[in-house]
Amino acid sequence: MAVRHRLIKTAPETVWAVLSDGGRYADWVVGTAESHETRGHWPHVDSALAYEIRLGPVRVGNETVVRRCKEGSILELEAKAGFLGTARISVELRSWGDYCLVIVDEHPLQGAGGALHNMGVEALIQIRHRAMLARLAAVCEAESGPEEAPSRSGQAESSSTADPREGTQEDRTAPYGWGRRPARGGGHA
């Protein structure tokens, strides 16, 4: 089961506004393009989005269905991936001071994805989640307006100019997205 979290430097309401807009699904979900509602009103239970997954020249149409929604805090999805089967994806939002802690939990439900699930696949899902949460953070933080935050060099940098596909410098350097370097003595801060 792949579980990953990220502190997004904006209010949970801003993050929920992005998650609850079906037309923005492709803005933050890695590998998707051209999302649109096909059933119901996103993110109500049993509503669905259709989108295209692009892997190089290969394009596959898929669908994601809302299985559980607690407005403002929980969105549970079932992503249908053709012959690979389906996966359960849970996105939970928690207030964390002035910010939003986002927790993503994904695991296969049915089909070949479940049968082939192993530590290697788990590692790939973790990498995908890391990129997905970086994109979600960039979209949400840009949505809430420019916020000056000190960089590691001490210079202020605006989070609104970040490309959601790139992630942050911290994402590229910190192991597993922990966002902190080990404290002196080798332990984690």
Image (spheres, helix red, strand yellow):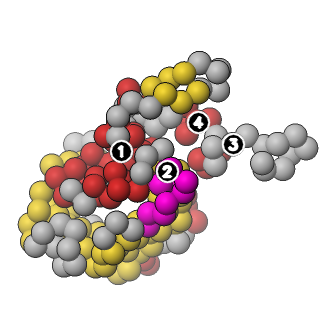
Q: Which residue is mark 4?
A: 170
Residue kind at label 4, given as amino acid type? Glu
Q: Secondary structure at mark 1?
A: helix
- Residue 183: x and y in percent read 82, 42
Which label's residue is closer to the chain start, 3 or 1? 1
Q: Inspect the magenta stretch and tell me whether residue 97 lies in it.
A: yes
Which label's residue is closer to the chain start, 3 or 4? 4
Given residues 133 and 152, the one toward you in this image is 152
Dot 3 and dot 4 residues touching (CB under 8 Å): no
Mark 3 and mark 2: Cα distance apart in space: 18 Å
Which label's residue is closer to the chain start, 4 or 1? 1
Dot 3 and dot 1 residues touching (CB under 8 Å): no
Question: Which disc, if any, is residue 140?
Answer: 1
Q: Inspect the magenta stretch and tell me whether residue 120 lies in it.
A: no
- Residue 83: x and y in percent read 26, 71
Q: Residue furthest right?
A: 185
- Residue 35: x and y in percent read 16, 54
Mark 3 and mark 1: Cα distance apart in space: 22 Å
Residue kind at label 2, given as amino acid type? Tyr
Figure check: 95 above or below 105: above
- Residue 17: x and y in percent read 28, 55
Which label's residue is closer to the chain start, 2 or 4? 2
Given residues 120 and 166, the one toward you in this image is 166
Q: In the rendered structure, which segment of residues is drawn in magenta? A: 92-101
Q: Which residue is mark 3?
A: 180
Which label's residue is closer to the chain start, 3 or 2? 2
The crowding category of the residue bearing disc 3, from other C-alpha atoms within 10 Å (few below 14, some 14 to 19, many at least 20), is some
